[in-house]
Amino acid sequence: MFLFNHIALSVKSVDQSVVFYQKLFQLKEIENTASNSKTRWLSLGEGKQLHLIPLPDAEIKINKAVHFALTTTNFDEFIACLNELKIDYSDWLDVPNKYYIRQDGIRQVYFQDPNGYWVEVNDDI
């Protein structure tokens, strides 16, 4: 049996990335128990974690097909939050400021973090 544990992202500025994820998702910072490095960990709840690894000189290659997704019961409030924080978002087809409705009725929106990583938020609860 396998269970999801964490996702790790290489970031240019760990401090900027922590602020972004905390402001947008209200994630709590937790102790990095693995090392004394400058990598910082955020809790995604239920033992799941986001690890932000500072690699300021690393080349980060991105495309929308490579993303991670979070789900919420407050999708409309989340869209309002994106607007309030002036974070550009789009649907899967890159239509600005629009969310996508999948064939199964699930709404989803995509945006990029400060390092260009794609994040999806949906209402698949």
Image (cartoon, rainbow, N blue to C red):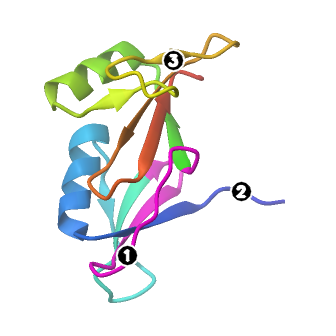
From this viewpoint, which residue is outermost toward the front? 94
Element on which disc 2 rests: loop
**Residue 88 at what x, y percent from top left?**
26, 32
Q: Compared to 87, does 106 lie above or below?
A: above
Give the magenta range. 44-66
Element on which disc 1 rests: loop
In the rendered view, does 38 fall on the left or right side of 16? Answer: right
Q: Compared to 57, does 105 lie above or below?
A: above
81 and 89: which one is in front?
89
In the rendered view, does 3 fall on the left or right side of 44? Answer: right
Classified by dominant secondary structure, the portion drawn in magenta counts as loop
User: Which residue bears the numbered disc 3?
Assistant: 100
From this viewpoint, which residue is outermost toward the bottom? 36
Q: Are marks 2 and 1 in contact (CB under 8 Å)?
A: no
From this viewpoint, which residue is outermost toward the right? 1
In the rendered view, does 83 fall on the left or right side of 1? Answer: left
**Residue 117 at what x, y percent from top left?**
41, 53
Q: Are marks 1 and 3 in contact (CB under 8 Å)?
A: no
Element on which disc 3 rests: strand
74 and 95: which one is in front?
95
Q: Amino acid at mark 1?
A: Asn
User: Which residue bears the numbered disc 2?
Assistant: 3
- Residue at the (25%, 18%) spot, across then down: 80
Q: Amino acid at mark 2?
A: Leu
Q: Quadrant of the N terminus?
A: bottom right
Marker disc for residue 32 = 1
Q: Amino acid at mark 3?
A: Tyr
- Residue at the (15%, 24%) spot, across then down: 84
The mark that comes first in sequence, 1 or 3, is 1
